[in-house]
Image (cartoon, helix red, strand yellow):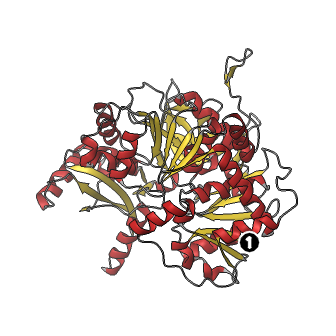
Amino acid sequence: MYIDESTGERELEYRKGTLFEIVEECSEKFPQAIAYEFFGKKVSYARMVEDITECAKALKAHGVEKGDKVTLALPNCPQAVTVFYAVNMIGAVANMVHPLSGEMEFKEYIDLSGSKIAFILDTFYSKMRNLRGTTSLEEIVVTTVQDGLGAIKGALYSLKNECAVKKPYDEGTCMWKTFLSDGKSHTGTVKADVGPMDPAVILYSGGTTGSTKGVIHCSDAFNALAEQLGHVADIRKDNIMISVLPMFHGFGVGVSIHTVFYYGMTSILEPRFSPEPFIKKIVKYRDNFFAGPPSLFEALVKNEKFAKSDLSGIKGSFIGSDSISPERERIICKAFVERGAPRPRQGYGLAECIAAVCLLPEGSDRYGTIGTALVGEDIIITEVGGTNELPRGELGEICINGPTNMLGYLNNPDETERTLKEHPDGRKWVHTGDLGTMDENGFITYVQRLKRMIITNGYNVYPSQMEEILDRHPKIRNSCVVGVPHPEKGQAIKVFAILEGGVERSESTKTEIMDYIRQNVAKYAKPYDIEFRDSFPQTKVAKIAYRDLEKEETDRLKSLGKL
């Protein structure tokens, strides 16, 4: 970072290079440093680059060329890291897909990317095998958890855990070890002539319309993100990242993986989240960072082991990927601070900018804000759908310009043009489809997805604002507000709520909460019903799946003849 003398603005300087070149540089600086650990198996930076190179040769031997799309449907494991950087080394593009996707979802991702080869864990193979012959997919490389552990640790893992049954895979399927062995036959060049601004990674987003879109990013954007995070989190080489955010997600691959290797840190690869084992790790590993959605932090503070743990080894933690009410944020932060940890810091980002673009400054005592812009990012609030910047404090659309902006949507120029808009200043800005405000000090408050806004009797109702009010009620642990079709109002409002432990699910409780709503929200926003739940459905990235609740309630009303 440096200060522009002509403007006084903070400018961002960061290391240039492809994703692989950044890792290669770290391996040359500190070859014996531990790059990652997986179920106790430690791999140095030197060994990681050897593994990446071996995988890159195998990709070439299997016909993958510069510019080809390679689908990765893997959890956080050594093979995922290896393939991700090997794909970049040969100039191909990593198509990052959730391994728990259904068959039709896999088909959508394969069709959109045109991938000919995909990597998947054996557990999920059956969902992808039928796509050969109906899509561009020609080959599936199947790997196992044991493949990432070595012979001895792999055998011990098999004894302790239920593993997928090995099947007689059909033609067009290759096992991981066979795939790597095939690389020995490649004798030509491996590293491609590509630059940091060339397409490198495809993430997936609903964008502003809710339909699935492939978001194209270059290596340069990932390097910029890593540098930005280093300026706001005091990241150092000897720090540890407990990488539980999945690699298919921008937050995961950008923050929990590439940022680690940008600085020469160590990643503790976590293929799945479970509160107690996770708490053990944040106690065991000193000077650690981790990031996750609100649901992860909620699960931690509710766990009995959390209350008995010394968390002074935490150096920083970050809440993102979904909104959280100020009241729940206060409860979580208080629980962390009481156990010796720094306050978790809320941030905001989106796949179109990889991950975080703003973060609550260190030491801030504010709640209900997503913080201020990271160095190098410009964030403004504009009129919805327009390019005119609004005065501070006014509600409008959050727009972003910075080095982490996407190159565009894959095979979707119309949507790219609608999202990446040129403003009067001549720069391209990402229109996020999110409503928010910015105060005089640059603190941003996220209000609502534009598409989630409920319009009832002509009035705009923002569910997140209602949820914030509901979550302040002492008997409510978490809430979700949805809108469903209504023949006269356009939409009607229903509340789903999870009650605090020990609170009775009764009509008297419902009446009490309804009275509270009448006192605290506008009359037009009054819900027609409150339904109590044990839990809420979640999306694959651990956000509340409010659309599922909307559909469920809409279907229920239809079955009753009320719609």
Q: Give the quadrant of the N terminus.
A: top right
Crowd around label 1: few <14 · some 14–19 · many ≥20 (10 Å): many
Q: Quadrant of residue 331?
A: top left
Q: Give the number of callouts.
A: 1
Task: Name the spot of residue 96 as percent of width and height, x first.
Answer: 63, 60
Using residue 491 as the reference point, say whether residue 220 is left or right of it: right
Amino acid type at circle 1 is Lys
Residue visible at 72% across and 55% down? 86
Using residue 297 as the reference point, say whether residue 139 is left or right of it: right
Helix, strand or loop at label 1? It is loop
Please state which of residues 121 and 114 is positioned toward the viewer in this rendering.
121
Task: Name the spot of residue 380 as percent of width and height, x first.
Answer: 60, 35
Q: In the orientation shown, which residue stands out farthest toward the front?
A: 152
Q: Give the quadrant of the C terminus.
A: bottom left
Task: Name the spot of residue 309 as percent of width and height, x first.
Answer: 28, 39
Q: In which quarter of the image is residue 509?
A: bottom left
Please state which of residues 121 and 517 is positioned toward the viewer in this rendering.
121
Query: Does the rendering let one see residue 546?
Result: yes
Residue visible at 31% across and 46% down? 522
Q: In the orientation shown, which residue stands out farthest toward the top?
A: 5
Q: Is residue 381 above or below residue 72?
A: above
Task: Name the spot of residue 73 as percent of width and height, x first.
Answer: 59, 65
Q: Is residue 544 above or below residue 224?
A: below
Please state which of residues 291 and 329 is positioned toward the viewer in this rendering.
291
Query: Does the rendering let one see residue 417?
Result: no
Residue visible at 75% across and 64% down? 58
Residue ID for mark 1: 116
Residue visible at 67% across and 39% down? 31
